[in-house]
Amino acid sequence: MSIYRGRIAPTPTGYMHLGHARTFRVAQKRAQDGVLVLRNEDLDRHRCKPEFTQAMLEDLRWIGLAWQEGPDVGGPFAPYTQSERLPLYETALRRLLSMGLAYACTCSRKDLMRIAAPHAEDDDEPVYDNHCRPAPGAVTEFAENVNYRFRVPDGEVIRFADGNLGEQLFTAGQDFGDFLVWRKDGLPSYQLACTVDDAAMQITEVVRGRDLLKSTARQMLLQNALGYPTPAYFHTELMLDEDGQRLAKRHDALSLRMLRAGGITPAEILTGFQQ
């Protein structure tokens, strides 16, 4: 049997909170007989900051997490920081373009707000109306300062058995539309970067929150298009605040950094996860 390879992939746009810690704790437990990778997903140039990266590493180790590969410890698939892996993402984009599976999109943010179909609150982008979609098979050349979308196979059903939530089913073109894979600022989307890195780092199971179920369906389409293997998936329940809203980095009082400063111990936090 091949070795289990899991990963945790925090984004240093703020301090890690209890929701991150609980999900990453699940990932660590599932990787206890294999390898856990920490990947620094720092592609948001405006919000990712060095001080958040340092705090991320410190606070996750404080809570008891340990990883065998990562930006601070190295490993066979380095670098483990996404901003240092841009050539890999561009290569994948160029492959999609050459196969007619991605195309340029000139729609502005204002255009998208006007033409977007209704979508779920937990979705990270609206269902695109195909305004810029070319004829089938059209090949687009790569150019700078352009947004690119992946052309989803309309009507294709994406199924997977989630390790926590059971059977999942999404329909391309209905549950989500053509999605961004590259932004005109020269950076890949979350969907493309995550897909490329999970394949390159030989991840066998992805553990993350249930708010990313549709992202999994999108990434499975990219995996198929690029000839990548599909890992197993395990989506955790989200941690909610006292008002029933999911935790976010704006919840400073529930960040690991603030709890740590307030004298809370890792044992107290981990005990709370089991209740």
Image (cartoon, rainbow, N blue to C red):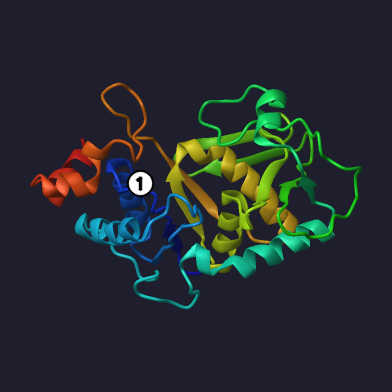
Q: Mark 1 points at which residue?
A: 23
Please state which of residues 131 and 178 is positioned toward the viewer in this rendering. 131
Q: Dot 1: within a 10 Å radius of its alpha carbon, few (fewer than 14), some, or many (20 or more) residues?
A: many
Give me the residue at 56% from left, 42% from top.
161
Residue 98 to residue 233: above or below: below
- Residue type of the residue flagged with mark 1: Thr
Q: Position of residue 22 (x, y in %)?
A: 30, 45
Q: In this view, does 100 lie to the left or right of 47?
A: right
Give me the residue at 68% from left, 52% from top.
222
Q: Quadrant of the C terminus?
A: top left
- Residue 230 appears in the figure: no
Residue 39 to residue 44: above or below: below
- Residue 167 appears in the figure: yes
Q: Is mark 1 on a helix, strand or loop?
A: helix
Q: Is residue 18 left or right of residue 153?
A: left
Please state which of residues 107 and 166 is positioned toward the viewer in this rendering. 107
Q: Where is residue 143 in the image (x, y as percent from the top left)?
A: 77, 59
Q: Position of residue 127 (x, y in %)?
A: 68, 31
Q: In this view, does 60 lie to the left or right of 104?
A: left
Q: Position of residue 101 (x, y in %)?
A: 80, 51
Q: In which quarter of the image is residue 51?
A: bottom left
